[in-house]
């Protein structure tokens, strides 16, 4: 198989960098942004499909590794109040966006399955009241398997959900204890079977390498459990980013419990080799899919996209986000809701929307967004396509950036000629670093510390 793992090259390029789920990244969004830009942009795109994202911020308990925007509580009634406010936001936004067909819906968090079946039904009813769902809509939801009943899979299918994602992370008890996420693999397996019987078309499992107490033996068993017992269509394999200064809950994880960087690299290698040996195709840099899954097909056909949830088949749709911290991406405008729950409620009471900051992309941002997306998704960039789309001469426009690609070219990881830029398969895990050459905002190195390391 392709050698992704030259330790010298990986350590040479193992710096901090964005994951490029958007360009510019969310750290560039500003409060000074004009909130009317979203509506103005929508007027130019009124008939195009929408992807809708709903953020549910509540969790039953705190996983120590977590860097998400969440609120830990035992009170399910808090979700009723949250739904009251989601209804205000949805009905207000529908006045502008409600005529656009929704082709994709994703519930993320936090923990969307914090909502009871009754609360989820209420949410779906309010969405369908204000938006038109297309007939073959993709509806996905993230599940925390610790607090759900088996029947939930059937109820979700009845509501129209056809894709689900389950956070497994690691099946070992010691690892689970150290991250405060103890859960039964047997139950997850039953839940997956139930979901498949109920008609779910695609099931994703999240795994994390680099967690406390993880060894090759332990992670090998996790990979065995996942491929043999759960057999999901897709697997996301993420690197644990230990940044306790930014995420206080990570202080519960002692440095001494973590694998060394060599051990972490060995865990990543084990993960990629095991999953590809079991027939999964590596998608981008951290997703895996069975060859007949549409994500794998999209990659083979050069139609892979990237959005705030990672690699996807429909990233070309405009995204409308609801709930705390949710991001919208409409044409050349990004906006993000406030992250604080109290502020979310206050803004909706006062203004009918909860937008805190955003960014209208400049012409330069649009060019770079397209370049970074192509390289992140396809490991290939056709310069002529960019020249036609933006009426520029690529090599002149990016003369500085092309010089900064030199180390990659020298190390045989990238080729650059008049027609195209091609990232070699060996450099797949370093694709973020290669894209950083085209990022106009990274010149401020202090800001770079806000991103996780590449490996
Ligand atoms: S990992 Fe998921 S369930 Fe755990 S605290 Fe974070 S958002 Fe909540």
Image: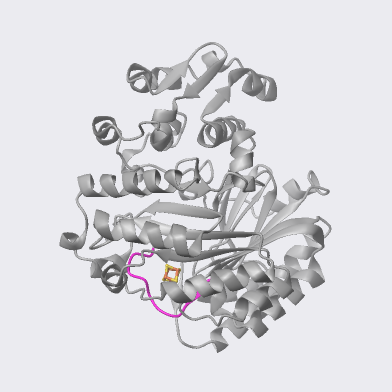
Q: Residue furthest top?
A: 418
Q: Nearer the viewer, residue 444 or 230?
A: 230
Q: Quadrant of the C terminus?
A: top left
Going 25% across and 34% down the picture, which residue do you hit?
Answer: 7
Spot occupied by residue 185 in the image (x, y as percentages of width and height) = 42, 72
Spot occupied by residue 251 in the image (x, y as percentages of width and height) = 24, 67
Q: Residue furthest left?
A: 256
The magenta segment is 56-66
Seen in the picture, residue 407 relative to 43 is either above or below; the reply is above
As for residue 300 lying within the magenta part, the answer is no
Res. 361 visible in picture: no
Going 43% across and 48% down the picture, which residue do you hit?
Answer: 275
Spot occupied by residue 177 in the image (x, y as percentages of width and height) = 28, 74
Res. 415 visible in picture: yes
Spot occupied by residue 447 in the image (x, y as percentages of width and height) = 36, 44
Going 81% across and 58% down the picture, which residue do you hit?
Answer: 134
């Amino acid at each position: 198989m392709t050698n992704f793992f030259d330790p010298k090259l990986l350590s040479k390029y193992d710096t901090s960098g964005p994951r490029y789920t958007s360009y510019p990244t969310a750290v560039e969004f500003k409060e000074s942004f004009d909130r009317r830009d979203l509506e103005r942009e929508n007027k130019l795109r009124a008939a195009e499909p929408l992807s809708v994202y709903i953020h549910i911020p509540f969790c039953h308990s705190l996983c120590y590794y977590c860097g998400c925007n969440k609120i830990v509580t035992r009170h399910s009634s808090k979700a009723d109040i949250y739904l009251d406010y989601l209804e205000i936001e949805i009905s207000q936004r529908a006045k502008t966006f409600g005529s656009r067909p929704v082709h994709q819906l994703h519930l993320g968090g936090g923990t969307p399955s914090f909502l009871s079946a009754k609360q989820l039904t209420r949410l779906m009813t309010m969405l369908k009241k204000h938006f038109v769902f297309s007939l073959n809509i993709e509806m996905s939801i993230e599940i925390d398997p610790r607090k759900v009943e088996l029947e939930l899979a059937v109820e979700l299918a009845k509501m129209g959900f056809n894709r689900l994602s389950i956070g497994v992370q690691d099946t070992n008890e010691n690892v689970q204890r150290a991250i405060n996420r103890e859960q039964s693999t047997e139950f997850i397996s039953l839940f997956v079977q139930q979901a498949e019987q109920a008609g779910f078309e695609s099931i994703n499992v999240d795994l994390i390498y680099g967690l406390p107490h993880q060894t090759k033996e332990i992670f090998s068993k996790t990979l065995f459990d996942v491929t043999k017992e759960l057999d999901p269509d897709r697997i996301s394999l993420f690197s644990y980013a230990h940044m306790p200064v930014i995420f206080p809950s990570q202080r519960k994880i002692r440095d001494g419990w973590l694998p060394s960087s060599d051990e972490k690299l060995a865990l990543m290698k084990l993960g990629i080799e095991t999953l590809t040996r079991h027939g999964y195709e590596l998608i981008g840099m951290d997703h895996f899919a069975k060859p007949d899954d549409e994500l794998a097909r999209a990659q083979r056909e050069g139609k892979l996209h990237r959005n705030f949830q990672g690699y996807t088949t429909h990233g070309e749709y405009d995204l409308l986000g609801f709930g705390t911290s949710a991001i919208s991406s409409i044409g050349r405008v990004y906006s993000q809701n406030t992250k604080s729950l109290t502020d979310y409620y206050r803004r909706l009471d006062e203004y009918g929307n909860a937008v805190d900051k955003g960014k209208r992309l400049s012409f330069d941002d649009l060019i770079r967004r397209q370049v970074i997306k192509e390289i992140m998704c396809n490991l290939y960039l056709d310069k002529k396509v960019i020249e036609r789309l933006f009426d520029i001469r690529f090599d002149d426009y990016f003369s500085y950036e092309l010089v900064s690609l030199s180390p990659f070219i020298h190390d045989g990881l990238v080729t650059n000629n008049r027609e195209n830029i091609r990232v070699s398969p060996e450099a797949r895990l370093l694709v973020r670093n290669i894209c950083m050459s085209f990022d106009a905002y990274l010149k401020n190195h202090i800001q770079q510390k806000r991103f996780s390391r590449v490996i």
